[in-house]
Amino acid sequence: MPTPISQDAKKSLQDKIQQCDTLSHEEKSTLYGLLSERKRYGLVWEDKPEQAYEQLRTQIPVFTEVPERRIMGSSADAPNHILIEGDNLHALTAMQYTHAGKVDVIYIDPPYNTGNKDFSYQDSFKDEPDWIGREHLFRHSTWLSFMEKRLKLAKTLLKETGVIFISIDDNEQAQLKILCDKLFAENNFIGMFPWRSRTAKADVPFGVSVDVEWVLAYTVGSFIAGRDGERKYFKTDDCTDRWRLQDSTTNKSKNERPNSFFTMVNPRNNAEYPADENRTWCVTVETFPSYVKQKKIVFPGDYPFLKIKRPAFRVFEQEDKSKAKQKFGTDDIQMSVSTYLDDKTIGRTETGTQELRAIFNQTIFGYPKPTTLIKFFINTCRNDSALILDFFAGSGTTLHATMALNAEDGGKRQCILVTNNENEICEKVTYERNKRVIQGYTNSKGEQVPGLTDNSLRYYRTEFVTREISLRNRFELTRKTLDLLCVKEDCYTPRNDLSCQEFQVFEATAFMLFLVLNPDSIDDVIQVIASQTKRCKVYVHSPDADPFSMDFDEICDKIELHALPDSFHRALREFLPDTNTDSVETAENQDD
């Protein structure tokens, strides 16, 4: 074992490193780190260089819309969902500007690194991706390097009340748990959900069929899960006459009450409950949807302690409020979420496969997650206007689940998907699936499935602007941020009647958005803003951090002002790798 180095010896070596002219700044920092390294508990791996990360040393990612793939919702207030085609490391970097601290729920289903070449990694020294096999020397290190970079970026996108759910299997579950304990903090670990993804196989190693995958959940602060906002205390833990939805008083028949003779369908799992011919429901087929939407009806399986076989009214006991207040300090107690996932309700991988086959009439994607699984995790957020992110989008289940939930409860949740276009997956699977879900499709049985038309979908690609700082590049970056700004502000309706070559104007319900490309047009912009009744968000191309504040002084009470590209640079600065390009001061004086 090597002899521990003394503090004096360390200081002497640090001085020598500092004085060495043949070492770069990065190399000196690495050596300093090695000298300061201490033994500690945790996960250690060989950090592997990645081409996508190295690209960020010279390039800045932005979003560019593909307008021909835009799908507009049937109403003006339809939620805007976003699909981004590109490397998720680049997309997450650009999202530090558009969505930092805004995301409620992240769900990801990353490559499991099974050793069966389900995970590829392109380092900075190769022209083609390297498919990682079981015998790869750095199999786990490569996967951990890949995941750490992305999870660090994802963490900053979450709200203080946000939560991230990560699907994984036994190949990397242990490593992922320790990595997330480090990135999100061990005390922010919410729980690990076991999900039975398949039924038992016979021909398996050791004679044990591994049928369970895992979903790890972490928060960054104060996330509290809940189930649909239900109160904890019910009248009874069994089914009494007071709970019954069947007409037990008059015993009207289907001929006497035809509107109350219908089949109830549980929107969560499509389970059907036909009415009794001799005792119809207490509600009518017309009022049933509103009862479900207001959560006045519970279904079998909603609560483990509630032993019912038929749908029932939800009844609360008034004195239970005081019990809750006394025990928990509040009378608004929510149902806790169990880590037990009943695969009969949640579904398995075959459920996801059947969903996709119904849409495409063929098996088009391997091992998709069922929408019921994703809906379960989104629902823990208890927010029907939540922003959901999936940056390993694959077949696009997360957006499908988001839109299905909105259709069930009238919510306005928004979803952002990110995926690469390897084997045209983004265009041919992710986009095409959700396009059909929105517009409607004919399923594998030849039945017409109506579309979830109250949703808009916008398609973007990641592109790049050079990081070399010059006047020309600053202007190009400002120009390229137009689509970023629309995404950032969720504002997409162009006001062509107000726009011109020098500035662009967009309108949302509550405000207007201005991108000023030419500061010489500020007087014209001020005139346009002065004639508007809505508050305005103004982004101005500026050579520094000042968005010409004094010029807007007369309307400062009506606007929110930002400088570009300075505000964009500041948002990304700590997430971009070091670069050896010339200093800002030198580059600013270059004449292009």
Image: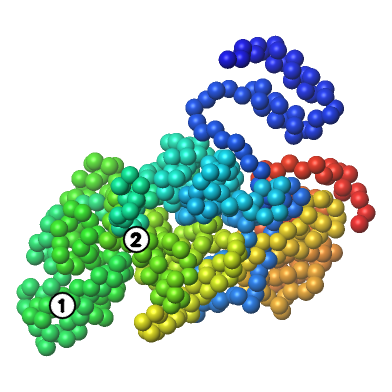
Q: Secondary structure at mark 1?
A: loop
Question: Crowding at label 2, few (<14), some or many (≥20) Cα neighbours within 10 Å?
Answer: many
Is 98 in front, or is 242?
98
| Observer able to see residue 45 | yes
Q: Quadrant of residue 229?
A: bottom left
Q: Residue 528, image x and y in percent?
A: 73, 71
Regarding residue 292, the answer to whether it shows in the image is no
Residue occupying the point 76% across, 60% down: 478
Which of 8/121 is in front?
A: 121
Above or below for 16 versus 526? above
* Distance in Å between CA atoms under marks 1 and 2: 30 Å
Q: What's under tag 1, amino acid-wise?
A: Ala
Q: Which residue is at a point 14% across and 54% down the rendered structure image?
A: 237
User: SS of the residue at dot 2?
Assistant: loop
- The quadrant the N terminus occupies is top right
Question: Relative to 25, does residue 86 appear above or below in the rendering?
Answer: below
Say what amino acid the circle numbered 2 marks: Arg
Residue 199 higher or lower than 502, as above or below? above
Task: Judge left or right: residue 133 versus residue 400.
Answer: right
- Residue 128 located left or right of residue 442: right
Q: Which mark is residue 348?
A: 2
State which tag comes first along the sequence, 1 or 2.
Answer: 1
Relative image position of residue 294 (x, y in whole percent): 30, 67
Which residue lies at the image location 52% right of the left edge and 70% below the top edge? 429
Q: Which residue is mark 1?
A: 275
Q: Are marks 1 and 2 in contact (CB under 8 Å)?
A: no
Expressed as whole percent of the image width and height from the top left, the position of residue 377 reads 39, 56
Task: Determine crowd level at label 1: few under 14, some 14-19, many 20+ residues with C-alpha closer than 10 A.
Answer: some
